[in-house]
Image: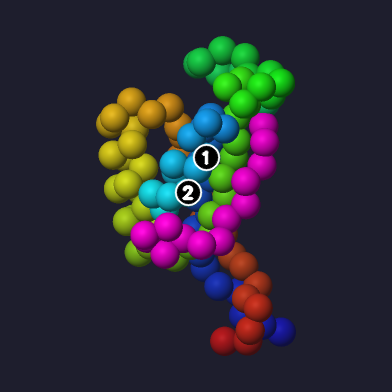
Amino acid sequence: MRSLEQKKLLTIITSKQLEEMILKKLAPHGIGGYTVVSGHGAGASGIQSGMLDIDTNILIYIILSEPRLERVLVEIDRMMDKGYRLKALVTDISILPRKPS
């Protein structure tokens, strides 16, 4: 059996309107693989029904190494300092790699 690899899972929760901008900011950091999922719910900014782009949240999932994560978090922190509304959650994960180590 393949050995599990230790990675980080970065989950970014933000408005659908910010998707393209966020992905463009992540690309220079070597982020090419990600999954985007639409979401709806309620939070500090009120109810997000998901009926319109301006009323839809997304979750962006990215699996990455810890050094790359640190560089990406600096970029996210800059965006938050500029007033963009987003949340960044980091989880320790183990993945089964595509190729044996």
Q: Indicate the position of residue 77 as horizontal and vertical percent values.
A: 31, 40
**Residue 62 vertical placement versus 55 (above, below):** below
| Whether residue 41 is visible | no
Which residue, given by chain and number where applicable, does mark 2 sit on? 23
Residue numbers of the magenta segment? 27-39
* Along the line of sight, the residue nearer the viewer: 7 or 28: 28
Which residue, given by chain and number where applicable, does mark 1 sit on? 19
The residue sitting at 71% across, 84% down in the picture is 1
Viewport quadrant of the C terminus = bottom right
Mark 1 element type:
helix
Report if the CB atoms under discs 2 and 1 are less than 8 Å apart: yes
Amino acid type for the residue under numbered disc 2: Leu
| Whether residue 99 is visible | yes
Real-space CA distance between mark 2 and mark 1, rounded to the nearest whole angstrom: 6 Å
**Residue 38 vertical placement versus 7 (above, below):** above
The residue sitting at 62% across, 46% down in the picture is 36
